[in-house]
Image: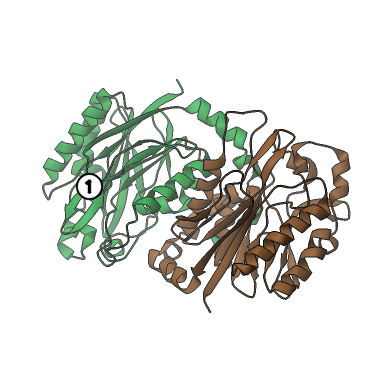
Chain colours: A green, B brown
Amino acid sequence: MSKVTVAALQCAYTANMTENIDRVEGLIVDAAKKGAQIILPTELLQGPYFCREERDEFFDWAYPANEHPVVQRLAPVAKKLGVAIPASIFERDNHHYFNSLVMIDADGSIMGTYRKSHIPDGPGYEEKFYFKPGNTGFKVWNTKFAKIGVGICWDQWFPECARAMMLMGADLLFYPTAIGSEPENPTLDTKDLWQRAMIGHAVSNVVPVIAANRIGNEGGQIFYGSSFIADQRGEKVAEFGRTETGVLTASFDLAQVKLNRASFGFFRDRRPDLYGILTQ
Amino acid sequence: MSKVTVAALQCAYTANMTENIDRVEGLIVDAAKKGAQIILPTELLQGPYFCREERDEFFDWAYPANEHPVVQRLAPVAKKLGVAIPASIFERDNHHYFNSLVMIDADGSIMGTYRKSHIPDGPGYEEKFYFKPGNTGFKVWNTKFAKIGVGICWDQWFPECARAMMLMGADLLFYPTAIGSEPENPTLDTKDLWQRAMIGHAVSNVVPVIAANRIGNEGGQIFYGSSFIADQRGEKVAEFGRTETGVLTASFDLAQVKLNRASFGFFRDRRPDLYGILTQ
């Protein structure tokens, strides 16, 4: 009962949302055939990473969370296959726009919405133009298969986010992502840094980490894939390169991970009395 | 003015404290010759890692911080060479015993004491028998060459500690260490985990990290060295293996590091309003 199989999906997207959802659905089916129970698509799978530019028309790509075409399409898929799917969407809530995650459980039910807490901004990643910083706080989801935390992309660089989800009881950490080249700094390749930050979370929290990133060339911005699954010691147990499309899977014995975590004693030895500065 | 050269020392120790301090002094001289300005010896350089066992007699190895033979010997060395030395000691303060760090600046002055906040406990690492958890809080030191944070060994696994020192203005993070094999679990080699956790801090805080670990076989417990210096992207720029004695050095342009840090925007995008759970 403590065994769980997870998957990370990696693919490119076009401007055609229906095609994109079709592609992701196909990969979800592949992942389920491989035994995956919790299946992570990349961030904003509905289409191109529009935050590459600041253009008003892209606000039309947002929908109320539960009405979002991605959710409408993937919830029945989750139910049919009996898999849980953290689905990343562009959400509109009246006059507010968020970079959000709708958690779909294995019976197709919507467990709720998490809104990305940390919003990046810079050349090629103009997210502060589109998204209000999330107002939900971090969330963990007691899915059919495991209690999981899901951070969205930029959240993955913040140790506070990983630790908070762990303190809320997460057994696995998932990160849907859209990251690639830096238009203003062609010599900066952040791929290793991106992995190192999350591998640090894996070790410091003794928890497996699953990250799914897109690939493809979108107007000269090259998304570098390199999706991976790391175990609770930060060892990469599955990893894609920068151009493959497909499904990564890995299985974990969460009871064993829990013993490893207790044995390390990090949660025993924390000093919350000294951490006040983190909240100022 | 923003350039700084740092060093990490790696060596083994015997039961003879004077010999141990002699050895460390020799390495400090070597490091200074290589241009190092801030020179990090390993944790508890006074002798064997006594926490391997729980024995009353070892409490006699503690001294009041400023009277500790390590401090008495290394402060004049710091002054003579014009280098800053974070010196790890076993401290006694009346009836309390701490795993402490005395910061010696380049003029030989004692800047103060930091007491290790996170205390491990387990087979081979029975620190809770000896040390009261530190009551100083995290500290940063405005040395002649740079503002630095120093965590002591187990502190290095805690992202909260690294982040707190950064929020206090640290430009470099140092970690004196004593870590090796696991007597109760011979198959567990923590070397990669140990490096990954600190490399995570380097990336998440865009800060160079300097770690110095001892080597040697102490009663069957094998200390694995692997001291390293990582740059602000988590790239190891200098690293020892598991058995070498010597000095690692690296130079950093702190003005450039500061620009890298600002450009990444992690400190811009933090959400202290959501981090309350970390202090509970």
Secondary structure category for the residue under label 1:
strand
Quarter-wise, where is residue B85 in the image? bottom right
Q: Residue at x 56, y 32 (%)?
A: A260
Foreground residue among B236 and B216: B216
- Above or below for B85 versus A229: below
Across and down, in percent, residue B196 comes to: 50, 46
Left/right of residue A111 with respect to residue A124 in the rendered view: right
Q: Residue at x 66, y 37 (%)?
A: B222
Across and down, in percent, residue B149 comes to: 61, 63
Residue type, mark 1 in image? Ile
**Which residue is identified by label 1?**
A215
Mark 1 neighbour class, 10 Å CA radius: few under 14, some 14 to 19, many 20 or more: many
Q: Residue at x 74, y 44 (%)?
A: B49
Left/right of residue A76 with respect to residue B276 in the rendered view: left
Left/right of residue A82 with respect to residue B73 in the rendered view: left
Q: Residue at x 53, y 42 (%)?
A: B193
Residue A122 visible, this orientation: yes
Across and down, in percent, residue A167 comes to: 53, 42
- Above or below for A157 versus B186: below
Quarter-wise, where is residue A108 in the image? top left
Left/right of residue B83 with respect to residue A199 in the rendered view: right
Residue most extreme to the bottom? B1
Quarter-wise, where is residue B139 in the image? bottom right
Foreground residue among B191 and A199: B191
Foreground residue among A92 and B247: B247
- Above or below for B274 versus B254: above
Residue A167 visible, this orientation: no
Foreground residue among B151 and B137: B151
The disc numbered 1 marks a residue on which chain?
A
- Above or below for A203 versus B115: above
Q: How many marks?
A: 1
